[in-house]
Amino acid sequence: MARACILLLVSALVLAACGGDNYRLNKFISDGTPEEFGIVPKEPLEIPDDIRAQSLPQPTPGQANRTDPQPLGNAVEVLGGNRAALNATGVPASDSALIAQAGRFGVAPNIRATLKAEDEAFLKRAKLFNVKLVRDDEYRKAYRRFILDAAAEILRFRRAGVRTPTVPPQQ
């Protein structure tokens, strides 16, 4: 009898600890304070050699400021990439064959809206059969059967005789 009472009390305390309005799926979600690593200093001001009005760059309203931080561009440049490729618009000529192959059966102009509607309908159907006592990641639970297991896929490919050179060797 005493064990049953203790078990009931512990169960009630565990369930009570799960409640509250401040439940977060991710414990790293900001609580309103600034993130230390999100603060990026401004680039240094550039002073031209000739400070006449004709030599100064024209202002570009609505565009990025020359002193605005560009951490992604800096990282690409440090790693040996082309910073200008980040601002490229359109499809590069090197990708034209890939785009032609991907669109060979036609392209739906409103694919994003269609996928969003289908995803919402799928999640709505999945919630009908989702009885829950404790909050859980609904999205992950709904798509659980579609998640690929990388290790199992590698084994499947190796058993089929497919070479997997980029995968670490078998132990």
Image: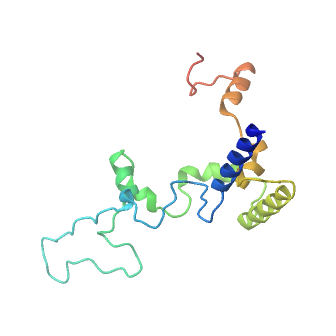
Q: Is residue 103 visible?
A: no
Q: Is residue 129 visible?
A: yes
Q: Which residue: 44% across, 56% down?
A: 85
| 109 is higher (above) or lower (below) than 135 | below
Render colour scheme? rainbow
Q: Quadrant of the N terminus?
A: top right
| 21 is higher (above) or lower (below) than 161 | below
Q: Nearer the viewer, residue 144 or 25?
A: 25
Query: Which percent across, then down, holds residue 130?
Result: 82, 54
Q: Which residue: 19% across, 78% down?
A: 55
Q: How many numbered discs sit on the rendered protein?
A: 0
| 64 is higher (above) or lower (below) than 40 | below
Q: Quadrant of the C terminus?
A: top right
Quadrant housing residue 164: top right
Q: Nearer the viewer, residue 75 or 132?
A: 132
| 53 is higher (above) or lower (below) than 102 | below
Q: Which residue: 77% across, 40% down?
A: 4
Q: Which residue: 36% across, 44% down?
A: 79
Left or right, 84 with reference to 150: left
Query: Which percent across, then down, holds residue 3?
Result: 74, 37
Q: Which residue reaches farthest top?
A: 171
Query: Which percent across, then down, holds residue 90?
Result: 55, 63
Query: Which percent across, then down, holds residue 91?
Result: 56, 58
Q: Nearer the viewer, residue 143 or 168?
A: 143
